[in-house]
Image (cartoon, grey):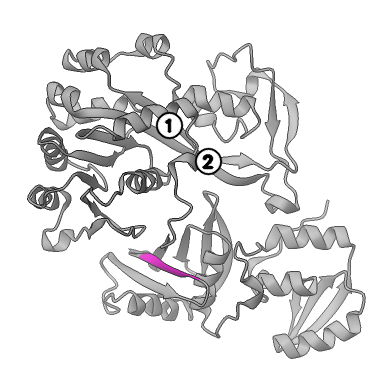
Amino acid sequence: MTDFNIPIEIQQLIKAEQAYQYRIVPFKKTGDIIVFKTDAYDRAGLEVELNVLLGFRAELQEDLTENINRYLSTNYRKSTSNAVSDIHYSNDFLEKILITAKEIGSSDIHFEPYEANARVRFRLDGKLKEQFHISTEEYPIIINKIKIRSQLDISEKRLPQDGRISISTDYDDFDIRVSVLPTLHGEKVVLRILSKDTSHIDLNSLGFTKSELKTYLEGIKKPNGIVLISGPTGSGKTTTLYATLKKLNQPDTNILTVEDPIEYTLEGINQVQLKENIGLDFATTLRTFLRQDPDVIMVGEIRDVNTANMAIRAALTGHLVLSTIHTNSAWATVSRLIDMGIPSFLIASTLNVSVAQRLVRKLCNHCKIRKPIAADLFPSGFVVPETLSEHYEAVGCEQCYHTGYSGRKAVYEILPIDNELSGLIKNNQLSIDEYLEDKEIFTLKKNAIALIKDGTTSIDEVFSLLM
């Protein structure tokens, strides 16, 4: 069986747009000769053109069109921008990496040093994929360029550092959050791409069902109280928060946010960047916010009891507070606040709605295949619902770059805090399985089963939600 994966050091010899434009795939390097596979008709003429374009000798070998298509879609991602055909990279390798990552829809770039070489990985649809290799000689130069552009100390290699880069091209403006971490073989750097374009952020397109959206909107339309969104890192909490702020952003409303980092800039909203090294932390900023006549306050994350207490205080004094917290379910948020030392009667009287969310990859509609349900596909002890008789599996095709998945969607668990639930919280009755059944609350698990049933995602993708 043919292996269509090309080694990274060979793959990075040409850009994705060159591979697709000329229908060429680098296959091996022998001295100063690069051997390409192609299905192009005029191979002699193409060799001459490539010699001039690429600056090294190109040797072309004929291959089947179906094989070339598979090589291209497996190893090279097309740009998500309409302007891709007009992009011209400079000779700066760092700029090439940054622009490529943004163009193909990557959320994070990882620069990782090891003993013999270094690699660059992009996070695409939630999964890391290796994109470039860098020599150990060139790696420190690139890291220093990143540190200079993000105004970090290039002489400091023993301590972590955080910074920010602003990128402006003819087609796009975006910011990059920079995190530098000292490791055994050098400094590992992670860049988070932060888009300035918020046009795609909308509550109606995030993944809420109609009933979930109705419940959530009721929670955020209250003049005061707390709305908490929980989930692990990378589950889309911040995107949900920004979509909520866009909904609440009106000319007669004063909205203040404190964030770390500011991932999107929103016109009409007063956003504060956290700076803990000078004492500007969540709790301190919240205390100042209360003297700024706010209507809505957004706190990037409730990390400690001081921040939680200030959020409660803000809600009690007539403000709507939005924030995130790290818990596994909507109800676990209540337990987490109690563990922090927040009195249960204060939680009961201030919490409007608790939300838990995850991001799952959607199956590619062009290649997914239907299969009968088998009990061994699920976690131990999982009872397969009678209504679930079949599921869909990921296969992989050119449309999804042979991953089997295309795009992601959020899965939600919305828990409105009504009078009955408020009473349970006050009495520290933290077992609510019967309540969830009686009220027909769709938990993450129920929503995951629904996504399997309608073929949106695979069992593998939501396996952890079924446990």
Q: Residue at x 26, y 52 (%)?
A: 251
Q: Which residue is more in the foreground, 60 or 85?
A: 85
Task: Write down the residue under mark 1.
Answer: 213
387 w.r.t. 63: above or below: above
**Left or right, residue 326 beside residue 93:** left
Q: What stretch is highlighted in magenta?
A: 172-177
Please indicate, yes or no, whether residue 125 appears anywhere in the rendered image.
yes
Main structural element of the magenta stretch: helix, strand or loop? Answer: strand
Is 174 one of the magenta-colored residues?
Answer: yes
Tag 1 secondary structure: helix
In percent of width and height, residue 169 lies at 49, 76
Q: Which residue lies furthest to the right in this view?
A: 41
Tell me the residue that label 2 is attached to.
409
Give the number of the mark in front: 1 or 2.
Answer: 1
* Residue at the image position 69 percent from the left and 34 percent from the top: 393
**Residue 220 location (% of width, % of height):** 30, 35
In the image, what residue occupies the spot 13% across and 21% down? 345
Q: Which amino acid does label 1 sit on?
A: Leu
- Closer to us: 375 or 365: 365
Q: In the rendered view, does 200 fall on the left or right side of 242?
A: right
Mark 1–mark 2 distance (CA, rounded to whole Å)? 15 Å
Callout 2: SS: strand
- Say which label, 1 or 2, has the lower sequence index: 1
Query: What x and y, as percent, mark residue 379?
Result: 55, 23
